[in-house]
Image (cartoon, helix red, strand yellow):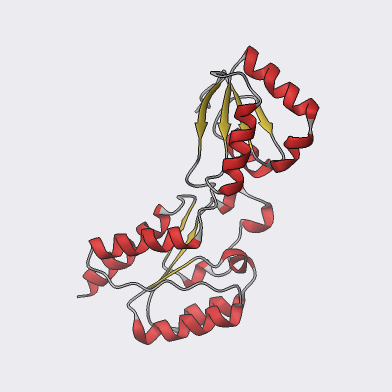
Amino acid sequence: MAKPKVKEVIVVEGRYDKNTLSQVVDAVIVELGGFAVFNDKEKQAFLRKLAKERGIILFTDPDGAGFVIRNRVKGNIPEGRVLQAYVPDIYGKEDYAALCACIYAHAQSRGIAVECFQSNHEGAIIDAIQEADTAFDGIVINPGAYAHYSYAIHDALRSIRVPAVEVHISDISAREPWRHTSVTAPACVKVIAGQGFPGYLRAIDTLEAMERQDV
């Protein structure tokens, strides 16, 4: 299937966004390099030239850094030549509080009790998994980088009676090669990747459907 052709120049923050978009659209994609563009006069001039000749579609993350970059780039380009400033949901870095709010609202709408937990420590995650075995009917887990090497988390998920769904905000199969394999996934009933925050909601719905089938 041919990729859709975009005549405007797509401008993105970093290499990951460029690599991802290049797989789905046929377009000229320019990488800003984050804040580095602020001191790169040549790149700023290049962007103005591209904007004048073809127009620009600007992609940034929906965090504070993305907001600053988006506004600085737009401020250096003649008005009307940034044809669209689009903040993608999947590639963004929305904060943990926003994620929890999204999860709680979805759970409340379905009459489900949930509890959010986050830790950077492998042992704390394992403790939470083991405690969930007697407190909840299922687990939604995003192991982050632990997914690629933590056999301890894999074993913890295997040792409990309740099912787990693994979630990744981005599509790990489209990222660096070492991210393509998840060692924790075989201990889960399903893996949902590349759907941003809605992936967590789909995981909740999956577990709810499984619970209904067992009733």
Say which quarter of the image contains residue 51: top right
Tag count: 0
Q: Is residue 12 visible?
A: yes
* Quadrant showing the C terminus: bottom left
Asked whether, in this view, residue 135 is left or right of residue 117, the answer is left
- Pinpoint residue 198: horizontal percent, then vertical percent: 39, 53
What residue occupies the far left of the structure in this picture?
A: 215
Q: Residue at x 26, y 65 (%)?
A: 108
Q: Residue at x 61, y 41 (%)?
A: 68
Say which quarter of the image contains residue 44: top right
Of the pair 71 and 186, the residue shown nearer to us: 71
Give the answer, above or below, for where 50 lies relative to 170. above
Say which quarter of the image contains residue 144: bottom right
Asked whether, in this view, residue 57 is left or right of residue 35, the answer is left
- Pinpoint residue 98: horizontal percent, then vertical percent: 44, 58
- Pinpoint residue 171: horizontal percent, then vertical percent: 54, 50
Q: Is residue 203 visible?
A: no
- Pinpoint residue 38: horizontal percent, then vertical percent: 73, 36
Give the answer, above or below, for where 128 lies relative to 94. below
Of the pair 21 and 120, the residue shown nearer to us: 120
Asked whether, in this view, residue 162 is left or right of residue 182, the answer is left
Q: Residue at x 53, y 81 (%)?
A: 126
What residue occupies the far top of the structure in this picture?
A: 53
Of the pair 189 and 137, the residue shown nearer to us: 137
Give the answer, above or below, for where 154 lies relative to 199. below
